[in-house]
Amino acid sequence: ETGVTQSPTHLIKTRGQQVTLRCSSQSGHNTVSWYQQALGQGPQFIFQYYREEENGRGNFPPRFSGLQFPNYSSELNVNALELDDSALYLCASRSPWDRELFFGEGSRLTVL
Amino acid sequence: KNQVEQSPQSLIILEGKNCTLQCNYTVSPFSNLRWYKQDTGRGPVSLTIMTFSENTKSNGRYTATLDADTKQSSLHITASQLSDSASYICVVSNNDMRFGAGTRLTVKP
């Protein structure tokens, strides 16, 4: 167990809908990053939050947005869902003193 | 072109055998290289982290090597077990993290 929890574990949406995925980071970890992993591929970096501010972003459109809360938990929001958004969404947290990333088990999103 | 290339894409070995997975990268400069194990449908779990000045790191039956001059890393698994069946992902970090597509390892009895 990494201490990083994600919810929901699975969900199904239709094209055009919006989705919110949630992540609780490991205690003391103030940096949270989100990744999209398509089937058979490696994770792709979406963005990172540090102390409630986005401080890094990958090559994803603005309809992918996020939040980090004072307790360092985080949300990933995706608007106007497309079929290609179907993937495993992973959250990872890190402490300020450690290079190690701890991943959650992911949220499996299916867009129909 | 991905900046982190892994080979082979998939590999099948018999239980008890050794194997070596490869990672070539073009990310430069880089601060560290990591190997993760990812079971199907689960989150990745860290195996090793190496900085550019380290050329080998072990974690039980897993040994990672790094040649920063040729920008190559390998992950060697000794005496494989059925539970080693998973995807193994190489990640190279600079200002951000670049993930390889992974090698899918299947260990058969």
Image (cartoon, rainbow, N blue to C red):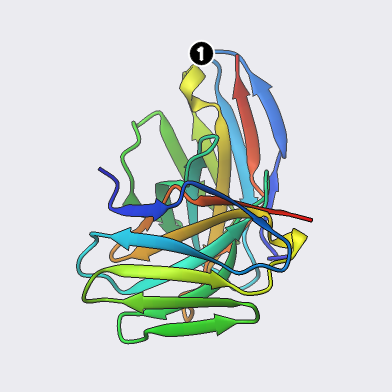
B20 sits left or right of A27 in the view: left
Q: Which residue is mark 1?
A: A16
Please provide percent x and percent y for residue B41. 68, 43
Please provide percent x and percent y for residue A109. 62, 30
Q: Nearer the viewer, residue B53 or A61?
A: B53
Residue A76 in sight here: yes
A79 is higher (above) or lower (below) than B93: above
Task: Give the position of the N terminus of chain B as an image quadrant.
Answer: top left
Chain letter for mark 1, please: A
Q: Nearer the viewer, residue A89 or B29?
A: B29
Alpha-carbon neighbours of circle 1 within 10 Å: few (<14), some, or many (≥20)?
some
Please provide percent x and percent y for residue B46. 57, 68
Mark 1 belongs to which amino acid? Gly
A2 is higher (above) or lower (below) than A47: below
- Residue at 52% in and 75% down: B48
Q: Secondary structure at mark 1?
A: loop
Please provide percent x and percent y for residue B57. 49, 83
A51 sits left or right of B38 in the view: left
Which image quarter: residue B62? bottom right
- Residue at 33% in and 48% down: A57
Q: Nearer the viewer, residue B7 or A91?
A: B7
Q: Say how many tags the image has.
A: 1
B38 sits left or right of A5 in the view: left
Residue A95 in sight here: no
